[in-house]
Image: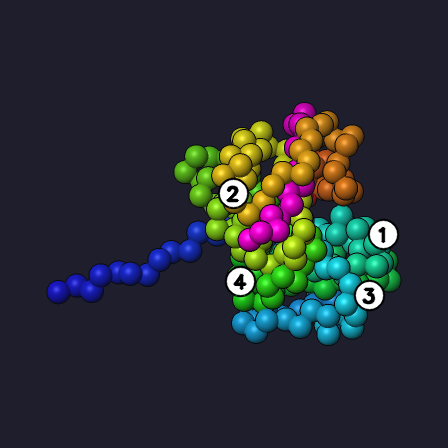
Amino acid sequence: MHEKNTHKRTIRSFVRRTGRLTPSQQRALEELWPEFGIEYGHALLRLDEMFGRAVPIVLEIGFGNGETLVQQATENPDKNYIGIEVHEPGVGHCLLKARDAGIGNLRLIIHDAIEVLTNQIPLDSLSRVNLYFPDPWPKKRHHKRRIVQHDFLGLVADRLKAGGTLNIATDWAGYAEHIDEVLSQSDRFACAERREHDGEQPLDRPRTKFEQRGLKKGHRICDWCFTKFTNN
Ligand SMILES: C[S@@+](CC[C@H](N)C(=O)[O-])C[C@H]1O[C@@H](n2cnc3c(N)ncnc32)[C@H](O)[C@@H]1O
């Protein structure tokens, strides 16, 4: 008798893009990683120890080339920042920007953010999670790859401190509808603010690279700030 195949295929929110590392990005990954990098692993991180101080922590999922992340870390020296990204050239670019900015309040992880949240980020440890212009996966058969799903909200809410926020932005109207729907069904988050605009009113964040691309194509931008309910 054939054994039943019980292996569940993981649905990921990204495909590894084949962008090549420039020589300077490659060097940054080698030389700057010891300063800014955190290896992916299965042990919970001791975040305050890692940064050498206990201040609010902001985590960004899918930071792309990291310019927005470095800008925020530079403008808010009183906070610590963690960025998660799977695209190595983007990480290399971010490392170079972080070095140029001379900041010490930023750490980066190269891995699937779902697994990092699950295995490395302690419960009740974050003040804010930023998700800016997540891959929209426009085709219907790919909607299941969208990172904003019921289970993702639970994962994030559990790692936010009481009163912590989840900040999302998208330029994709279909994804905006999806986000409105999934979040309206959530018992973990309340919508504190929602804004639609043409790039002139980003909600408590700098403009991002993917936002610029969307604006050039005439897309409208939607920004949200969701607050974690304090009773769960
Ligand atoms: C459309 S880009 C947006 C990049 C950047 N936030 C911006 O606005 O310019 C989405 C990014 O999320 C990353 N990404 C998608 N799913 C991810 C995951 N599960 N873990 C880490 N990074 C992810 C992709 O590699 C990609 O760089």
Question: Which is more N-terminal, label 2 or label 1?
Answer: 1
Residue 101: quarter of image: bottom right
Residue 48: quarter of image: bottom right
Would you say residue 143 sits in the magenta stretch?
no
Residue carrying label 2: 186
- Circle 3 or circle 4, nearest the eye: 4
Question: Which is more N-terminal, label 3 or label 1?
Answer: 1
Residue 118 badge? 4
- Circle 4 or circle 2, nearest the eye: 2
Residue at the (81%, 50%) spot, across then down: 71
Q: Marks 4 and 2, Cα distance to the nearest angstrom?
A: 19 Å
Is disc 2 placed on a helix, strand or loop? loop
Q: Marks 1 and 3, Cα distance to the nearest angstrom?
A: 12 Å
Residue carrying label 3: 104
Magenta stretch in the rendered image: 217-232
| Chosen colour scheme | rainbow
Q: Residue furthest top?
A: 218
Q: What residue type is labelled 3?
A: Gly
- State the image coordinates of residue 166 (x, y, percent, origin top left): 64, 47
- Circle 1 or circle 2, nearest the eye: 2
Q: Marks 2 and 3, Cα distance to the nearest angstrom?
A: 36 Å
- Marks 1 and 4: CB-CB under 8 Å? no
Residue 75 badge? 1
Q: Marks 1 and 2, Cα distance to the nearest angstrom?
A: 32 Å
